[in-house]
Amino acid sequence: MNIYLLPRKKGKYLLYSKEFQVEPLRRRRPAKPNDSEQSDRRSRLLNLIKSGYKTATAPRERSEKLLKEMRELSQITVYYPANLSEDKACDIYHHIIQSQIKKHKRWLIVDGALLPLSAIFSLIPGPNVLMAYLAWRTLMHYKTKKGGERAAFDLEICFVKDHQLETLFEIVNRRFVFSRAGKIKAIGEEIG
């Protein structure tokens, strides 16, 4: 699997893999309200809430998918900007992975602690959505943490310099670049 160490502003980096990207949400015009159908209004409201949730959690979902799927890999290739040394790229990669492990471990503890408390809501008639959500999030944090631990310690990692990422680094870190978005998009299309 190919993973790219993408530069961001102020010396920060992001792990990117094309295989685990969330599809962008398509914007739709809201349909005209129809007073005769109450259920149609309710389903539109639920769709609106669902799309808002997906928009808010898209960055988290990308990193979770990437780390979760690393549990099943044996080798990855990390492409990094050519202006970095291999040791620096390795340090950045491990720092990102370690911070993700730490974050998911913390949330695993929080969601796991709240899970038994959500059983109180079982007394209320109807589905216990809070308990289902907390159980799902606890499982996802566990899988992501395990994938991160595998990515940090067990995988065979090959680091490769990429000159396109060096160009991206220069574009991102310059104060003023004419047509910055277009240049970044062109580099993204070349990388794949």
Image (tube, rainbow, N blue to C red):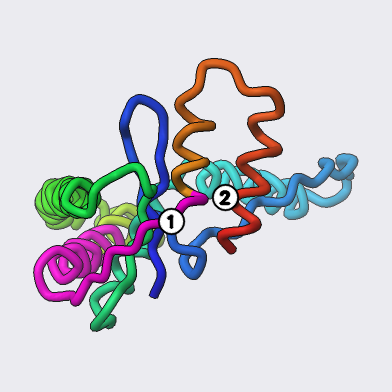
Where is residue 173, by image quadrant? top left
Report the magenta stretch's main SS. helix
Q: Secondary structure at mark 1?
A: strand
Where is residue 126, by image quadrant? bottom left
Magenta-colored span? 136-164
**Measured from the top left, where is residue 130 in percent x and y?**
32, 52
Q: Nearer the viewer, mark 1 or mark 2?
A: 1
What count of labels does the image hold? 2
Q: Is residue 101 left or right of residue 137?
A: left
**Measured from the top left, where is residue 63 in percent x and y?**
36, 55
Q: Is residue 192 left or right of residue 89?
A: right
Q: Which of the pair 17/120 is nearer the observer?
A: 17
Q: Which of the pair 68/114 is nearer the observer?
A: 68
State the residue at coordinates (69%, 23%): 178
- Residue 114 shows in the view: no
Instruction: Please determine whether, in this image, residue 84 is positioned above or below residue 154.
Output: above
- Residue 75 shows in the view: yes
**Measured from the top left, where is residue 72 in percent x and y?**
27, 82
- Residue 50, labelled with which disc? 2
**Measured from the top left, where is residue 117 in percent x and y?**
14, 50
Instruction: Please determine whether, in this image, residue 102 is positioned above or below residue 160.
Output: above
Q: Identity of the amino acid at label 1? A: Asp
Verify whether residue 178 appears in magenta: no
Image quarter hosting the C terminus? bottom right
State the residue at coordinates (26%, 56%): 134
State the residue at coordinates (23%, 76%): 71
Q: Identity of the amino acid at label 2? A: Lys
Image quarter hosting the N terminus? bottom left
Q: Secondary structure at mark 2?
A: helix
Residue behind mark 1: 162
Confirm or deny contact between disc 1 and disc 2 (CB under 8 A): no
